Image (cartoon, rainbow, N blue to C red):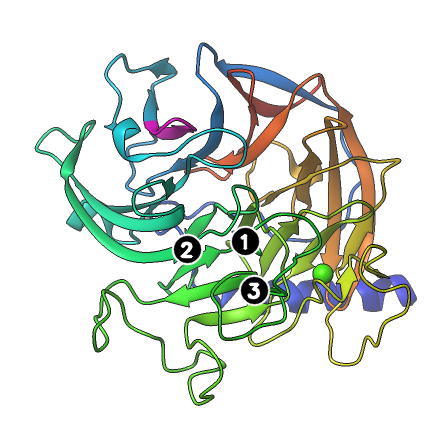
């Protein structure tokens, strides 16, 4: 009976999810959750090598099936029909300060990219003081090459230190651009940016790139949580984050998962929701931040759905909920990893709890990111120069 109720619950959740608008309209195939199957044995199949410091991979959602791979120094390469195109899609090396956690860190395509050719990047710039830049660009007449002179700077955020620059930008199912901002760097958030709503640091931002507010290159969505507070930046969607290097939306349910990199003790996975405070630097994962306060008041803080200590890894790399069709047993699992321990896990969350969180694979790779193609199959980026596709081992 309990199992039946559980199954019914999953079906209800799944149907509720179906009403959410998929992020990528070019594809209709999305696996739904029916039952949780035993985890499959997976392998990583090489998709491309000979890349230089790759940090991100995504698709344009335009039906072209191309994969776009970001190289940290400021280049975007295209993988088309299994081949790496010799001429880069994009090259802004001259504008970018790269190295450590700095560089060209991600690319996101407008939900209507197929019609308007607009895309967005997040990079670190040294010009006039270190800062994060979120800019819009356009493709050229050749769809495999961007017009690098078309830059429209959308947003800049000063960076007091070289680390914790966040890095990810992605469009939500609501059509707004989400920007993950780190706490500005150093260690233990010396300026307390995580808990400060008057700075864009240490927060998840949400903006409308199709509108322009007064004096702004973007609009503020009406339902952002802090639009009426004089002491808060209206761009903030959620806060209390340390360094949300990678985040993604479940294309079926719209749920936003983020991997927030920890300080010295805990790596965490958060489900990021409107207006919530994810704790940093009061808390590091599920504990009071050891280097800041041995005891803490957790009132009003949202805890991670999962976290792990140094026995499992050192820097969490947020991944994707698997919605592909090649590996049915992975359907609905959030696949994430760790840069240092090189492990990958599969986590199954059905609100309000985690049902499963297990080791999926011990890899040999310095995992810098995950990404999906237009069929929602998941790829793993190895910082030493390759990208692998997750496949089921027969
Ligand atoms: Ca937290």
Q: The N terminus is located in which quarter?
A: bottom right
Q: In the image, what residue occupies the spot 77% across and 48% down?
A: 36
Expressed as whole percent of the image width and height from the top left, the position of residue 281 reads: 71, 63
* Residue at the limit of the structure toward the left, as seen here: 141
For this view, does 331 lie left or right of residue 158?
right
Can residue 319 be found in the magenta stretch? Answer: no
Location of mark 2 (residue): 158
Q: CA distance from mark 1 to mark 3?
A: 35 Å
Query: In front: 366, or 381?
Result: 366
* Place of residue 308 in the rendered image (x, y in percent of width and height, measured from the top left): 83, 46
Residue under pointer 3: 17
Mark drawn on residue 184: 1
Residue 346, placed above or below residue 181: above
Q: Quadrant of residue 295?
A: bottom right
Is the residue marked 3 within 8 Å of ligand 1, measured from its CB? no
Q: Dot 3: what SS?
A: helix
Q: Is residue 71 magenta?
A: yes
What is the distance, in whole Å, between disc 1 and disc 2 at their CAs?
A: 8 Å
Label 1 or label 2, whichever comes before in sequence order: 2
Q: Position of residue 123 (x, y in %)?
A: 38, 41
SS assignment at label 1: loop
Vertical order, 216 against 214 (above or below): above
Q: Is residue 66 left or right of residue 388?
A: left
First in sequence: mark 3 or mark 2?
3
- The C terminus is located in which quarter? top right
């Amino acid at each position: 009976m309990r199992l039946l109720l559980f199954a019914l619950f999953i079906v209800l959740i799944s149907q509720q999810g179906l009403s959410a608008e998929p992020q990528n309209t070019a594809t209709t195939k999305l696996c739904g959750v029916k039952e949780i199957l035993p985890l499959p044995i997976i392998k990583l199949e090489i998709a491309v090598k000979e890349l230089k410091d790759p940090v991100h991979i995504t698709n344009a959602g335009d039906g072209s099936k191309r994969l776009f791979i970001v190289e940290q120094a400021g280049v975007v390469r295209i993988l088309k029909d299994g081949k790496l195109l010799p001429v880069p899609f994009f090259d802004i090396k001259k504008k970018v300060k790269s190295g450590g956690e700095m560089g060209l860190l991600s690319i996101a395509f407008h939900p209507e990219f197929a019609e308007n050719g607009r895309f967005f990047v997040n990079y670190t710039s040294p010009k006039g003081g270190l800062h994060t830049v979120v800019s819009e660009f356009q493709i050229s007449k050749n769809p495999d090459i961007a017009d690098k002179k078309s830059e429209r700077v959308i947003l800049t955020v000063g960076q007091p230190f070289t680390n914790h620059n966040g890095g990810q930008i992605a469009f939500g199912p609501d059509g707004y651009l989400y920007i993950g901002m780190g706490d500005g760097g150093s260690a233990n958030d010396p300026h307390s940016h995580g808990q400060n709503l008057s700075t864009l640091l240490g927060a998840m931002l949400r903006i409308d790139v199709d509108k322009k507010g007064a004096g702004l290159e973007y609009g503020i969505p009406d339902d952002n949580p802090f639009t009426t507070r004089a002491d808060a930046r209206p761009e903030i969607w959620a806060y209390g984050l340390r360094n949300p290097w990678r985040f993604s939306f479940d294309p079926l349910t719209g749920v936003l998962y983020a991997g927030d990199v920890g300080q010295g003790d805990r790596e965490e996975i958060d489900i990021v929701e409107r207006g919530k405070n994810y704790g940093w630097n009061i808390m590091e994962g599920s504990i009071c931040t050891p280097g800041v306060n041995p005891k803490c008041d957790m009132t009003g803080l949202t805890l991670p759905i999962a976290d792990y200590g140094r026995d499992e890894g050192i820097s969490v790399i947020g991944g994707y909920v698997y919605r592909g069709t090649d590996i049915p047993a992975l359907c609905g699992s959030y696949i994430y990893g760790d840069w240092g321990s090189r492990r990958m896990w599969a986590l199954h969350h059905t609100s309000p709890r985690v049902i499963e969180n297990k080791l999926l694979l011990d890899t040999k790779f310095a995992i810098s990111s995950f990404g999906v193609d237009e069929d929602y199959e998941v790829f793993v980026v190895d910082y030493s120069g390759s990208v692998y596709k997750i496949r089921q081992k027969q």
